[in-house]
Amino acid sequence: MTASPFDSAIWRNALFDRDTAALFTDTAEVRAIMIVLGTLAKVRGERGEVPDIAAKAIHRASLELQIDPSGLAKGVAVDGDPVAPVIQYFRELMQAPEFAPHVGEGATMAQIEDTAQALRLRQFLTIMSERLGAHDTLAPLAARLKVSHIADADLAKGLNLGLADADTDMAFADFADWMVTTAQQSAATSPLASALVALITGLNHSLQSARDTDAERLTRRMCLPQMALALGRLNSLAK
């Protein structure tokens, strides 16, 4: 088996959940970051903070450019996050040196990454809400997914996320706790189901233990996607 069972060809049929798996790939992560970058440029252009022609070019490019995730590996190893190399490649692929410096302006790397993560978790929550028939129950949790630490109502509206406040890290932690609770309430009964519940619980312990430490962000990157994939598969087993 591979280090992560979700990457295993052998275990693919046992663990694969098509709907949720599509949200937690390298390509999906890059696409979410580019959506944030494009929307950020668009709203800043509308406010006159970025030249209109540059904002429109960046927004259009965010929808059209294709960035190979494998090309980001070297940059991630150096910078410790995927956003900086995405911005670098974005600027290069635009082939518009007069506009490229505006890509990523107006937010930090961490803010962009967390906002992109919130986009993917919102999609995941939409899938789970439909499967569980719990739209009203999960609405407050969905409302906790916000533009990260950026008090920008226009960006929040453009991304259909909540307006930022100071509890972004807590929102992710609460989301992880919700996944544990939902997993433990699952009707699925099999050795595989029990293993998935144990995996989700264990990953959440790692995530929560890293709160307020230098390792919090990286631990969250490692844990949340696997927890979501496990919960998605557990839910499908209960059908």
Image (cartoon, grey):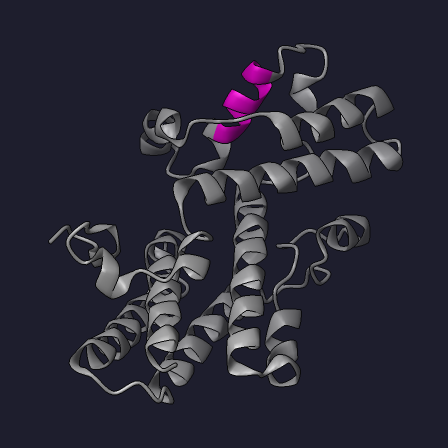
Question: How many tags in the picture?
Answer: 0
The one of 32 and 155 positioned closer to us in this rendering: 32
Q: Tell me residue 150's x, y (percent).
A: 69, 51
The one of 142 and 236 positioned closer to us in this rendering: 236
Image point (39%, 69%), residue name: 232
The one of 30 and 84 positioned closer to us in this rendering: 30
Query: Where is 174 relative to 43, above or below?
Result: below
Q: Tell me residue 180's x, y (percent).
A: 37, 79
- Is 21 situated left or right of 14 in this image? right
Image point (34%, 86%), residue name: 184
The answer to which quarter of the image holds residue 62 is top right
Q: Is residue 104 visible?
A: no
Q: Determine if the magenta segment contains residue 13.
A: no
Q: Is residue 214 visible?
A: yes
Q: Tell me residue 94's x, y (percent).
A: 62, 16
Considering the whole magenta stretch, tell me its main secondary structure: helix
Query: Where is 111 relative to 197, above or below?
Result: above
Q: Tell me residue 194's x, y (percent).
A: 22, 81
The answer to which quarter of the image holds residue 208 is bottom left
Image point (38%, 24%), residue name: 71
Q: Residue furthest left?
A: 1
- The quarter of the rendered structure image containing the N terminus is bottom left
Q: Which residues are magenta?
A: 86-93
- Is 75 situated left or right of 52 in this image? left
- The quarter of the rendered structure image containing the C terminus is bottom left
Image point (39%, 28%), residue name: 72
